[in-house]
Amino acid sequence: MGGRVIVVGSVNVDLVVAVNRLPGPGETVIGGTFARHHGGKGGNQAVAAARLGASVVFIGAVGDDAFGAEARHALEVEGIDTTELLTVPDAATGVALILVDAAGENSIAVAGGANGEVSVKAVGSALERLALTGSDVVLVGHEIPTATAHQALARARIRGATTILNPAPADGLTAATLALADILTPNDGELAALPADRPARGTVLVSLGAAGARLDRDGSSLAIAARPVTAVDTVGAGDTLNGALAAALASGRSLEEAARRAIVAASLAVTRAGAREGMPTSAELEGALRAD
């Protein structure tokens, strides 16, 4: 039997406007269309893993508001265990304002709200209740307080679980926190922003957009090509990669195979609009892998 994927991270509601081109500073672009989606990197990563058949538990927080109730329900309908998703009184659920242009590129501003209330104590207690084992994968995001992300990685390490840190955003992370991650999953911009004194050895899966990814492991590098697709919306591609990577590792696949599956899943995700709407199912991913 495979292990679980435990996601520790953010959950938001995404308010999205699709426009022909992204506005410059001080510029207004009209003629867009509006849609509302469920998001947050942590929530998205949990959905990506669940769609691919993983048993997923989500640890995070929402506000005591209508958005929070909707966000919880959206995770539950994907089969995700939300027992450890806190509702914080007097806090607003996180909201992301997203602009997407005709080429699928995006610009995002986030009001974190209840995500900032995910405490060290709450996460530590949640992980203790979950009784982690060496078969589990703990995927930690950084849209929650840095100290909380550090605690999640440290507790998971003690229990022998595989730890993945998605350093997005990269600001505020220290070498000590990075050293607790068995696998780092930055994009190329985030990689450049990580502390210069981060551990020189270890495993880093660098996402490179349409160019695929690079797997750096103990001094060696492996290029992983993306599938050639027409991008409709790149929002959520990185989250799909992270969730798919965690799901594959929890099922017992090798790192190299898990990374390949993650890149193919991310390639599929950009072909449909919406961070979660584009995330592939197990059947879709297996079909794409066979086609390759």
Image (spheres, rainbow, N blue to C red):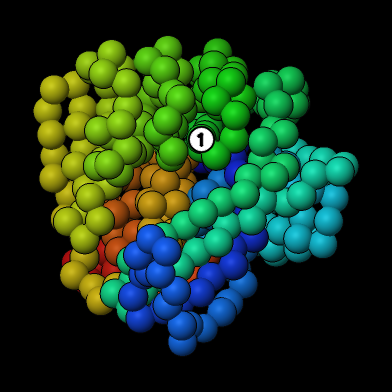
Q: Is residue 245 left or right of residue 144?
A: left
- Badge 1 is on which residue? 142
Q: Is residue 99 left or right of residue 118?
A: left
Which residue is depicted at the point 32% across and 21% down? Answer: 195
> In which quadrant of the rendered image does the C terminus lie?
bottom left
Q: Quadrant of residue 201?
A: top left
Which residue is depicted at the point 73% across and 51% down? Answer: 93
Residue 262, x across and y down, in percent: 34, 52
- Can the viewer see residue 253 in this picture? yes
Q: Is residue 274 left or right of residue 263?
A: right
Depth check: give the residue in front, 104 or 150: 104
Residue 73, x across and y down, in percent: 75, 61
Looking at the image, the residue that sits furthest to the front is: 26
Depth check: give the residue in front, 226 or 17: 17
Q: Quadrant of residue 249?
A: top left
Residue 189, x across and y down, in percent: 27, 41
Q: Quadrant of residue 117?
A: top right
Disc 1 residue crowd, few under 14, some 14–19, many 20+, Cα 10 Å: many
> What amino acid does circle 1 point to?
His
Looking at the image, the residue that sits furthest to the right is: 89
Residue 183, x across and y down, in percent: 36, 30
- Position of residue 243 relative to residue 191, above or below, is below
